[in-house]
Image (cartoon, helix red, strand yellow):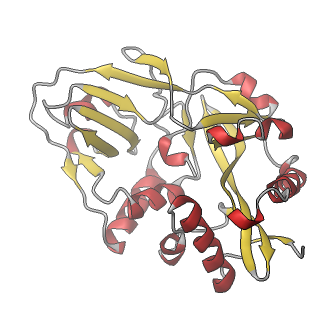
Amino acid sequence: MSYKFIKLDRTNEEMRRSFCELSIKTFGLDFEDWYQNGYWKENYLPYVCVKDDKVVANVSVNPMEFNMAGRHVKLIQLGTVMTEESERNQGLIRKIMEKIEQDFQDKTDGFFLFGGDDVLEFYPKFGFQKAKEYQYSKTVHNTERASAVMLPMNQPKQWKTLENIIEKSICQSSMEQENKKELVMFYVTKFMQENVFYIESQNAYAIAEIEGEVLNLQQVFSEQKVDLDKIIVAFGEKIRNVKLGFSPLETIGWEMSELQKEDCTFFVKGEIWRDFEKLMISVLSHT
């Protein structure tokens, strides 16, 4: 078999579209608009296997910088792991993983990824270990009317406004990705165009999803430290439960529980993970 293992040049239209075709087929996920909108940059690096000028396997490398409890940490997230069905069981992902290890083992403090139930025995072969994440939630009894204003995100001008807000925001969680703008915009421009809100009382912006009486607060942006309780109040009296998509700076008043996700296991690699406990990777930092 004539396989080539390369780092995908995202500006190569033919290869990029082949990559997107495999991603759509595997995950129902198209990265083309992310590229066309200008947000696919150097912090998303597909390591691909090519056969007959087609991408047949991939592991994407996501170099990330985190503020973890006040400590600057460089991490690598691996994602978009996929193989064309006809090319499976050829050891292609193994070869890609070995190449990534060679390229980044001395350039990062640690690795992490999220794997499905069908690969629980695969990643440990590369030194990954299963790990736990912890989510924070609380029951609330708001009496005030909703004041959070939804800001639609379906136009480039609106995206640029949010970009500026993200760039100016200070750290609002105990494990916050610092180079997060492009990845947050991936979510906002694709799936969450109606999930960005402005809270005037805190001069803050929130990305949130409301499911009945449950507020899933995924991220908060502000130039000042925010009061999460006041952010929650801004979503009105119908909210009875709040779940955070990030680890709060202050945990008093929050209930912590192990995060359980169907067909999704958290894997980590590296000594750095021994220094941090009871945290979660922000929902908007998943790839």
User: Residue at 46% of width from left, 18% of height from top?
Assistant: 256
Q: Is residue 158 above or below residue 232?
A: below
User: Residue at 83% of width from left, 55% of height from top?
Assistant: 100
For residue 81, which quarter of the picture? bottom right
Question: Who is closer to the viewer here, 254 or 54?
Answer: 54
**Residue 109 seen in this snapshot:** no
Q: Position of residue 282 (x, y in %)?
A: 51, 40
Q: Position of residue 230 (x, y in %)?
A: 25, 30
Question: Who is closer to the viewer here, 27 or 223?
Answer: 27
Q: How many marks?
A: 0
Q: Is residue 238 left or right of residue 220?
A: left
Q: Position of residue 212 (x, y in %)?
A: 21, 36
User: Residue at 44% of width from left, 57% of height from top?
Assistant: 187
For residue 14, which quarter of the picture? bottom right
**Residue 3 seen in this snapshot:** yes
For residue 58, which quarter of the picture? bottom right
Q: Is residue 42 above or below residue 127?
A: below
Q: Is residue 263 left or right of residue 275?
A: left
Give the quarter of the figure containing the N terminus. Answer: bottom right
Question: Who is closer to the viewer here, 73 or 81?
Answer: 81
For the view shown, which residue lies furthest in the front direction?
86
